[in-house]
Image: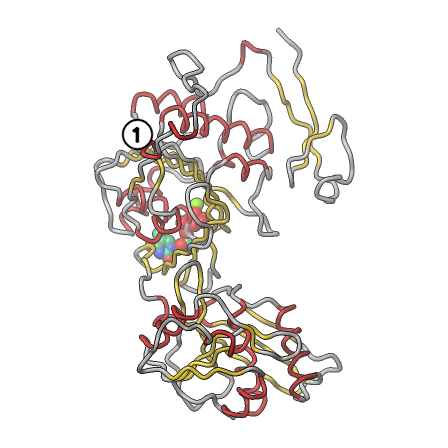
Amino acid sequence: MGKIKTAYFCQNCGAQSPKWIGKCPSCQEWNTYVEEVIEQPKDKQHGYKKSSGSGSAKPKKLSEISTKEAPRTHTGITELDRVLGGGVVAGSVMLIGGEPGIGKSTLMLQLALKAKDKRVLYVSGEESDVQLRMRAERIELNSSQCIIYTETDTGNIFHHINEINPDIVIVDSVQTMISQAVESTAGSVSQIRQSASEFIRYAKETGTPVFLVGHITKEGSLAGPKVLEHMVDTVLVFEGDSNYIYRILRAAKNRYGSTSELGIFQMQAKGLFEVSNPSELLMSHYDNSLSGIAVSATIEGIRPLMIETQALVSSAVYGTPQRSSTGFDIRRLNMLLAVLEKRCGFRIGAKDVFLNIAGGIKVNDPAIDLGVMCSIISSGEDKPVKPNVCFASEIGLSGELRPVTRIEQRIAEAEKLGFNEIYVSKYNIKNLQINPEKIRVVASNKIEEVFKRLF
Ligand code: TYD
Ligand code: MG
């Protein structure tokens, strides 16, 4: 018997070291190194093995490669297909990350049951078969082609996979899988890496798409080694506030499509429902006489979304004013407040400012800036924004309105939803491709001009 080799791995980022160290030189975390077995004697190695000989791929010219080799399968969940770039590519490995309770298992089970003509193998290392059956009953779906297998040992899984010959494999979750090839416990860096690489090898050799469910740490990154994200083809992040019903599926990495796509779901009593008209849902159909509310035309992925921002400005009770925001970058908020103070002369420095994006959605699109500012001023002055008005512009440090991308789409969406005025930057309308009839496009250079018109 050969000698067992061990090394120390950072449980946060996966860095390897021959000896224990207190602070990880790679991710700067303290006390994260754990000893793990890295190599077993040859005779004990397990994992996926293909029966035929190795080296089936040969070097070939780029022009000789046909892209027809990657046909896409539709999963039966339109929003998921959209995020993946139009469906699942054969042999691709997709990692789905998200906080506990966000709905990863529900999404995967729905996929397994909705892909009716596909044989789907759902490997569960977290829930029992009874629990899965109960969940399937709850979401009121059934499929004769869905096979549930509660197992964590990858050796056993691959043994059965060869018999079942599934069209799609789901592994829930990769952190619970154990490969006999390494001797550390489930969830450790080398164990995750080993089991993931076995599934990846299986996917590549058989052309079967594999979904791996992954946990997320408190800091919001995928638990386990960073290398896991490099190994897979697609990283999807399922996010949302578990207190709200909305769930957003984003691609953080996608070798087969764009990462700007977005899928929106609603978690209801009977499972996840796709939201195809998000703009209508995200606005809270408020009373027009309320102050502190403004609507922005944003773009998430390639989809225009009308998003409502709500602000509350009040005199600070304590010495230091509070600034808090949900769904919007706090540093960006501070910057916008500084612009309001310096460029527009609003005395906001001594006020508490609270900002909220309706629906628990996180927005990264800078085009929401103008809407955010208008909601803050509206609350500060206690004057409601005129009804049926919306905004789409980034704000620069000197209070200038900056152009945003895809203005035509934003205007069209606002028009569709019955808005009759949209405030944009002057630079945006120079070569505007469309000529909207029902909506007036108000172009300005400076934030003051917008405020003068509005309040
Ligand atoms: P789950 O898929 O188990 O989350 P994850 O696998 O990401 O940890 O989701 C569980 C949550 O979703 C749980 O809090 C209950 C809720 N839920 C519903 O609201 N409706 C449903 O139909 C189902 C199945 C779950
Ligand atoms: Mg789960």
Element class at badge 1:
loop
Q: Height in image: 67 above or below 334?
A: above
Q: Residue at coordinates 69% horizontally, 25% vertically from top-left?
A: 7
Residue 119: x, y in percent?
A: 26, 33
Q: Residue at coordinates 40% horizontally, 25% vertically from top-left?
A: 157
Residue 38: x, y in percent?
A: 63, 22
Q: How is the image coloured?
A: secondary structure
Q: Amino acid at mark 1?
A: Pro
Residue at the farthest top position: 1
Q: Height in image: 115 above or below 361?
A: above
Q: Residue at coordinates 75% horizontally, 43% vertically from top-left?
A: 30
Quadrant of the rendered image holding ligand 2: top left
- The answer, for residue 101, to whether it is visible in the render is no
Q: Height in image: 12 above or below 179?
A: below
Is 72 placed left or right of 20 in the picture? Answer: left
- The answer, for residue 42, to whether it is visible in the render is yes
Q: Residue at coordinates 43% horizontally, 17% vertically from top-left?
A: 49
Is 148 placed left or right of 151 in the picture? Answer: left
Residue 241: x, y in percent?
A: 48, 61
Q: Which residue is mark 1?
A: 166
Nearer the observer, 422 or 371 = 422
Is 142 placed left or right of 97 in the picture? Answer: left
Mark 1 is surrounded, within 10 Å at the Cα level, by few (under 14), some (14 to 19) or many (20 or more) other residues, namely: some
**Is the residue marked 1 within 8 Å of ligand 2, measured from its CB?**
no
